[in-house]
Image (cartoon, rainbow, N blue to C red):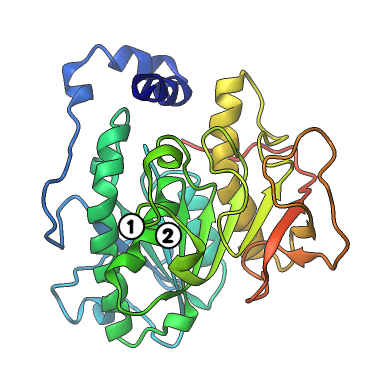
Amino acid sequence: MRVLCLVTIVVFLATDVSAIWNAFDIEYWRCVMKKTDICPDKDIKFYLYTRATGTRRLRIDVRNHRSLEYSGYDPMKKNVLIIHGFNGTESKRPMTILRDAYLSRNDYNIFTVDWRPLAKFPCYLSALSNMKLVAQCSAQMYSFIMENGGDARETTCVGHSLGAHVCGMISNYLDVKQHKIVGLDPARPLINRYGDRYFRLTKDDAHQVQVIHTNSGILGEVNQVGHIDFCVNGGKMQPGCKGHILRRSRCSHFQGACYYAVTVRNKNAHLGQPCMGTCPKQGSDWNLLPGKPIPMGEDTPFGARGMYCVDTHSTTDCPFE
C-alpha cells in the first residue's frame, strides 16, 4: 500500500515530459532528509517583501537582531507568513500570485518561507520528514517577528499543501497559540494515513483555522479540518482546470492559492453558503443549509464556524509552475 501511494503521487506530479526524462538521472533522485534539529538551517530561507521594495526580496537572518529593521519591516503593520508545499518554492506561481496580492495592499509585512531543497520532486517521503525542521525554524522566525514588535493578533500563517501542515506544526514550537492560520488545500497523501495531530493542520493549532478545499479526496484533505472550511466548486475538481485527469487534479490543488489571492485584493470576492460538513460534494447537490453567507478568505469573520460551500463562477485556470 505504501508503494502504491508513492507511485500515485509520482504519477500525479510528473505531468510533463521533462520530469519523466529526468527520472533516468541519478542526481534527480538524490533526496535530502534532515537529521538535525538545529535552526537556523541553510536550506530554509526567509524573505521579507514590503510595498516599498516590491518584488525585490530581502533575506531575513534571525541571528542579526537588526535584520528586520534594515529590511524595512514596519511593526505597525500586519504580518503574513506564506509557506509553499511539495515541489514548490516561494518564487514560483502560484505563491508569487499570493505574494503580489498582499503587495497590492499597504497594510502587510509579507514574509515567505523557502524550503525548496527539502521539498523537491520526486522526494515526497523526505519532504514529509523535513516538515518538522521547517516548522521549528519557521517558529523561530515567528518568534523573531514578535520580539521585534509584531502583534500575534495581526499575524497570519498561510500555507499551501504540505505548507498548510507546516503552518499547523509551527504551534508545536511556540509557547502561545497562533492567532490565525489559512490552509490552502492541505496535503492528503500519506498524511491522511500516518499523520497524527502533531504532524498535520488541525483546529487546535490557532484561535482561527480556515481551510479552503479545491482538490479534496485526491491531493487535498477531506471534510472539515479547521474551525471554518470552504468547499469550493464541489471541492474536488475546479472548473478552470482543463486537460487529462492528472493535470486537472494538480491544477485544482493549486487553485486555492488564486482563489484566496482574489479575496486579499477584493473584499467579499467569494461568498460561502452554509452546507453539510462533507467535502468533496457528490454531484450537483451541495446539501446547502439555511443561514447567512459569509466571505471566504481574507475577510472571513473571526469566530465563524462550520462548512461553507462556494461557487466561484470561475472558468479561468490558476497559473502554476
Where is 266 relative to 308, above or below?
A: below
Q: What residue does disc 1 label? A: 113
* Residue placed most toward the observer, 34 or 92: 34
Q: What residue does disc 2 label? A: 82
Q: Quadrant of residue 317?
A: top right
Where is 23 relative to 124, above or below?
A: above
Where is 175 relative to 1, above or below?
A: below
Q: Residue at x 38, y 50 (%)?
A: 196
Residue 194: image location, x then y, percent: 37, 40
Under circle 1, the secondary element is: strand
Residue kind at label 2, given as amino acid type: Ile
Mark 1, Cα crowd under 10 Å, few <14 / some 14-19 / many 20+, is many
**Mark closest to the chain's N terminus, 1 or 2:** 2
Tag of residue 271? none
The answer to whether the residue labelled 1 contacts the one labelled 2, judged by CB atoms less than 8 Å apart, is yes
Horizontally, is 128 left or right of 210 in the view? Answer: left
Under circle 2, the secondary element is: strand
